[in-house]
Image (cartoon, helix red, strand yellow):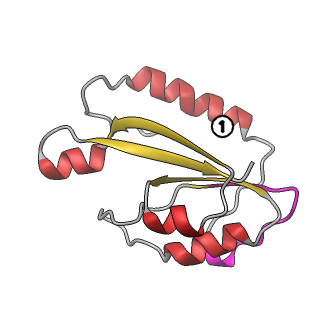
């Protein structure tokens, strides 16, 4: 957390910084993989959390091949969770067990359109 982001209404920089520090403590013994998901090996004892660029969204970074991500998750023996907006591709092909939905403000969409945009964000899990 650099302190340079978070200008949206209701943002609390001190709370966000505290949450980031707590997350750092929780993950201190975790093996964090970096790089393209296509090249990361996943073992049965691993837990995968994927937060890819959401299908159908545009931002200042490239999107990914979501079918390849779905195939990788479906074919690994690890527990996983993946964040997304609801999409026909994920609904049809991702072998998920649970689907958790929350409505939140999309900072990127709101910034691009100049007004608050509520979105339904999904967390799919295979457990």
Q: Residue at x 78, y 48 (%)?
A: 30
Q: Which residue is mark 1?
A: 24
Tell me where residue 93 appears, x and y as whole percent. 58, 70
Query: Would you say 101 lies left or right of 71 here?
Result: left
Q: Is residue 34 visible?
A: yes
Q: Is residue 43 above or below residue 82?
A: below
Q: Quadrant of residue 28?
A: top right
Establish if 74 lies above or below 18. below
The answer to whether 38 is drawn above or below residue 4 in the figure is: below
Asked if residue 37 is among those painted magenta in the image, a careful observer would answer yes
Q: Position of residue 18 (x, y in %)?
A: 54, 24
Q: Nearer the viewer, residue 18 or 108?
A: 108
Q: Assess whether residue 60 is covered by the magenta stretch.
A: no
**Residue 90 x %, y %:** 52, 64
**Quarter of image, res 79:** bottom right
Q: Position of residue 103 (x, y in %)?
A: 38, 36
Label 1 crowd (10 A; few <14 / some 14-19 / many >=20)? few
Location of residue 10 with respect to 38 vertically, above or below: above
Q: Which residue ends up furthest to the left in the rendered image?
A: 114
Please give the count of numbered marks on the rendered protein: 1
Magenta-colored span: 36-49
Residue 3 appears in the picture as rendered: no
Quarter of the view holding residue 39? bottom right
Which residue shows up at 34% across the image and 66% down it?
56
Q: Which residue occupies 53% across, 55% down? A: 51
For label 1, the SS is: helix
Determine whether, in the image, residue 85 is placed left or right of residue 32. left
In the current view of this chain or complex, which residue is farthest to the right?
45
């Amino acid at each position: 957390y650099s302190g340079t982001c978070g200008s949206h209404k209701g943002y609390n920089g001190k709370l966000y910084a505290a949450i980031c520090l707590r997350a750092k403590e929780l993950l201190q013994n975790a093996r964090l993989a970096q790089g393209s998901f296509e090249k990361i090996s996943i073992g049965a004892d691993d837990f995968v959390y994927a937060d890819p660029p959401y299908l159908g969204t545009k931002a200042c970074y490239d999107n990914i091949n979501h079918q390849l991500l779905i195939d990788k998750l479906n074919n690994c023996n690890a527990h996983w969770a993946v964040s997304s907006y609801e999409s026909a591709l994920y609904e049809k092909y991702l072998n998920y067990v649970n689907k958790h939905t929350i409505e939140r403000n999309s900072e990127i969409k709101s910034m691009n359109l100049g007004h608050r945009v509520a979105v339904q964000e999904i967390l799919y899990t295979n457990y």
